[in-house]
Image (tube, helix red, strand yellow):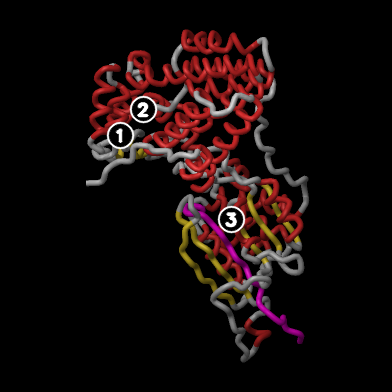
Amino acid sequence: MNLPDRPITILIAALGGEGGGVMADWLIAAATQCGFPSQSTSIPGVAQRTGATTYYLEIFPATRDQLGDMNPVFSLTPSPGNVDIMVASELIEAGRAMQNGYVSPERTTLVASTHRIYATIEKMQMADGRFDSSRVVEAGKQLAKQAILFDMRELAQANSTVINAVLLGAMAGSGALPVPREACEQAIRSGGRGAEASLRGFAASCEIAAGSRPTPQPPAPPKRAEGLQEILDLSISRLKDYQSETYAKLFLERMQPFLDGDSKLASETARQLALWMSYEDIIRVADLKTRASRFERVRKEVGAQEGEPVLVIDFLKPGVEEFASLLPPFLGRSLTHWAEKNGKLDAYNVGMHIKTSGVFGYLLVRSLAWLKPWRPFSYRYREEQKLIERWLARMRIAAQRNPALALEIAQCATLLKGYGETHRRGKANFLAILDALVENPAISDAVEQAKSIRKAREAALADPEGKALGGALGKPVTWLKPVKN
């Protein structure tokens, strides 16, 4: 009898809470049912989003009776170029596996979900720091012997289960798994609670991987609104929701000088202005956290059944800036200047865990959202509007000289985002460019001025600390850094 030369190797990269350990147990249970020797190991790690664990399994596709007195030798760790089935519960985890050499065209079946959970490094960028998902998908198709790629999270949610069952179904349907589908289903059934939902997700995924119905394509990234009217409509809707119809009318009044000019400038100005006018403050955060649509989304994401309670705890850490932002302008300015002078901007931040799914926690956070009518009288509102008017005035002047110059000034607003220390850095970079290159340029040529602004903006986006921008401006950029006691 000819025995296999080597075990089938399976490497699983799963994020925390996705049931990677349960899936590994299902595979071992299925192999045991078939009488195949097997071994699994797990390595806890970090995926820069949540806790992550890598699971490595080896299954020798021959029964104990066939082996007789022989015992296969298993490895505890995977090696590049020797993985038969690579499983990734999220697209960039698949990209990481390919980068590390675990996917090869001679051997590997790649099973991966095409949905994204953005990494910290993507979120912390000053501009759009998202990785290009299409490049990972194309690489998977080229580097793997067989690639099973579709949105498995969406399929899991549709079947009210966790993604691990869908991943296992895709493995079973791919034909690369050494154990039959029935053994996998029996392993899931033996898990008890939630088995029926897991079996539904398993079956649906297995059919897709086996090709019994067309494989759904990864969702296309949302297209950026190009039409000016579409951007204006979206902006008005956003600002009505953020504050009021009067606030939306203010947006339109501010846009009037740009509507009859260069269409690209008008579109970019509208987009940046709407985002800036709807700046994130504690009122906005409280409003979004206590909306019914948010609780519905959370229930859907965790797969809660009707009538099943879901506990939602929000972590908040307000400090001097957040408190001062809600005060009348004179008091807010005085408190902020005192905190800046004494290095106390982040000294009194208090971390709070608030159960917003409970009555008391919900009312506590919702009470902040009810301060929306007060926002126009607050210190933060007054400061933001003053800076917006300063920015718009410079764009109106620049538009008369050269629309491309005005467009570069408009795009400088991308530096303003986040809160706390992140917002202070971005604002310092924005003001440095506005002062040195927009309001007091060293050159009079509009084209050269536009180039210098673009170069400085790109430097600020690449290095939020301001060192690269300082080099572009020829002088250091300073921002108020909290003094640690």
Observer able to see residue 39? yes
Residue 318, numbered circle: 1
Q: CA distance from mark 3 to mark 2?
A: 34 Å
Residue 55: x and y in percent read: 54, 65
User: Which callout, 3 or 2, points at the residue further toward the start of the chain?
Assistant: 3
Observer able to see residue 124? no
Residue 282, numbered circle: 2
* Res. 143 image quadrant: bottom right
Q: Amino acid at mark 3?
A: Glu
Q: Nearer the viewer, residue 296 or 190?
A: 296
Q: Secondary structure at mark 1?
A: loop
Q: CA distance from mark 2 to mark 1?
A: 8 Å
In this picture, residue 473 sits left or right of residue 88: left
Packing grade of label 3 (10 A; few <14, some 14-19, many >=20) is many
Q: Amino acid at mark 2?
A: Ile
Packing grade of label 1 (10 A; few <14, some 14-19, many >=20) is some
10 drawn magenta: yes
Name the residue that disc number 3 marks. 93
Q: What span is colored magenta in the figure? A: 1-18
